[in-house]
Amino acid sequence: MEQQTLSVAKAGLVTTLSTATSVFGVMNPKGAYDPNKSLAVSTGLSTPLLSRFDMILVGFVPIYVSLPIH
């Protein structure tokens, strides 16, 4: 669907249809998420696969370790 059209030939009819697709995916990182590592390393997905997406948003909740104060 990289051309954003779909050609259909059925029952003697030939037509070209416009297409639009959105894909939304969510995944957990391999182990703890490290913002200093590449996304491919953090997720375990290959770089060629990640390059197929137009937009990638990374959302995470930072973990703060509170130490006791004496």
Image (tube, rainbow, N blue to C red):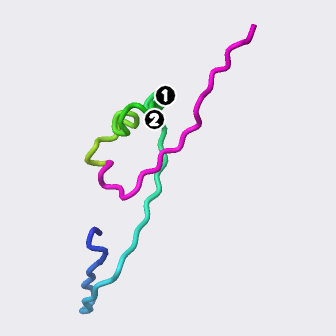
Query: What residue sits 26% from the left and 73% below the top?
Result: 3
Q: Is residue 60 magenta?
A: yes
Give the position of the C terminus as an image quadrant.
Answer: top right
Left or right, 14 with respect to 59, comes to left
Q: How many marks?
A: 2
Q: Check the image and report above or below for 5 versus 69.
A: below
Left or right, 49 with respect to 56, comes to left
Camera-nearest residue between 64 and 54: 64
Q: Which residues are magenta?
A: 50-70
Tag 2: residue type?
Answer: Pro
Mark 2 touching mark 1, by CB under 8 A? yes
Left or right, 36 with respect to 10, comes to right
Q: Check the image and report above or below for 68 versus 34.
A: above
Query: What residue sits 43% from the left and 31% below the top?
Result: 30
User: Which residue is under mark 1?
Assistant: 32
Q: What whole-number distance in Å separates the C-alpha atoms at marks 2 and 1?
A: 6 Å
Left or right, 61 with respect to 58, comes to right
Q: Check the image and report above or below for 56 versus 8.
A: above
Q: Name the secondary structure under disc 2.
A: loop
Tag 1: residue type?
Answer: Ala
Q: Quadrant of residue 41?
A: top left
User: Which residue is under mark 2?
Assistant: 29
Q: Is residue 11 magenta?
A: no
Q: Name the spot of residue 12 as percent of width and height, x first.
A: 24, 92
Query: What residue sits 36% from the left and 76% below the top?
Result: 19
Camera-nearest residue between 8 and 63: 63
Q: Quadrant of residue 10?
A: bottom left
Q: Main secondary structure of the magenta part?
A: loop
**What is the crowding at mark 2: few (fewer than 14 residues within 10 Å), some, or many (at least 20)?**
some
Q: Name the spot of residue 62 as percent of width and height, x first.
A: 58, 33
- In the rendered image, the residue lying farthest to the top is 70
